[in-house]
Image: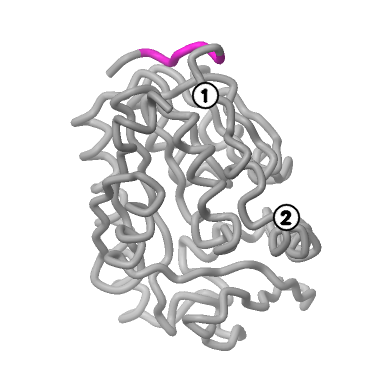
Amino acid sequence: MTAAHPPGDRSAPSSREQGEGRGEASTDRPLLDDQIAYYRARAPEYDAWWYRTGRFDRGAANNAAWRADVEAAEQAVIACLDRERPAAVLELACGTGLFTRIVAPRTGAVTAVDASPEVIAINRARVAARNVRYVQADLFAFEPPMRYDCVFMSFWLSHVPHARFDAFWAMVRRALAPGGFAFVVDSAHDATSHAVDHPTPDRHAGIVTRRLDDGREFRIVKVFWEPAALAARLRECGFDADIGATKRYFIYGSARAAQAHFSE
């Protein structure tokens, strides 16, 4: 793949992209601020969800099914990166590094972005890689400083409100070098994915309440995409997407912008 392109190669966001969903999006700011506050507060306990410990321990059978799906999702990411060999990757919502540690050894440079300094600190300690540069930023205000061969996001797209979907993917398109691709890993809707003291989220509500170990509660965005629906929605944004799923817990896949969008 090509190396990252300088900022001058990027197209500025159109007035439609800047204003997309402006009325509705302007009213969701308190919800998004609560979402950021939640992930900042959750940073030291976040990994319990991934490793199925504490409130996320669902018993031997469910935990084994989860771990099998984790392995499938991780292997899909590894296979894609080994095949594409991107020179530079932009990781959005890098979190505690559960996937940064997979991405970093398979590319020349990673720009890892997250709104939470607490998770960035955990990520930095876990990954400890010289080729990773960390950026603290609200992803709804972030503008990529260059173009990348890959834009990677794990468990982030489900936190993008419907009203901001087009504008978010317009930013992803601006971040991609010609021929580049995005890769998404995210949550499928399953009643045993969340903590045992969380109610099963409504598949269609778009907002859920989450509780921390200390009992504090926060409202966050949570959109459960089905693979076919996500691929269709991405086509509306000018991306050709190939989205699949593990047996129960995750969706994953790649998306490439139509060439016409690079010349707009």
The quadrant where residue 249 appears: bottom left
- Location of residue 98 with respect to 130 vertically, above or below: below
Choose the circle earlier in sequence order: 1 or 2: 1
Q: What is the span of residues highlighted in magenta in the rendered image? A: 3-7
Q: In x, y percent, where is residue 226?
A: 34, 70
Residue 140 shown in magenta: no
Disc 1 target residue: 11
Q: CA distance from mark 1 to mark 2?
A: 29 Å
The percent position of residue 107, horizontal first and vertical second, equals 36, 23
Quadrant in which residue 39 is drawn: bottom right
**Quarter residue 139 falls in:** top right
Relative placement, left or right, of 189 versus 202 is left
Q: Residue flagged by tag 1: what amino acid is it? A: Ser
**Residue 245 at x, y = what percent?**
26, 64
Q: Residues within 10 Å of mark 2 (few under 14, many from 20)?
A: some
Q: Secondary structure at mark 2?
A: helix
Majority SS type along the magenta span: loop
Name the residue: 77% across, 78% down.
215
Work out which quarter of the rendered image holds the C terminus and state it: top left
For disc 2, the marked residue is: 36
Q: Nearer the viewer, residue 186 or 17?
A: 17
19 and 203: which is toward the camera:
19
Q: Quadrant of the N terminus?
A: top left
- Residue 117 is labelled as none
* Element type at mark 1: loop
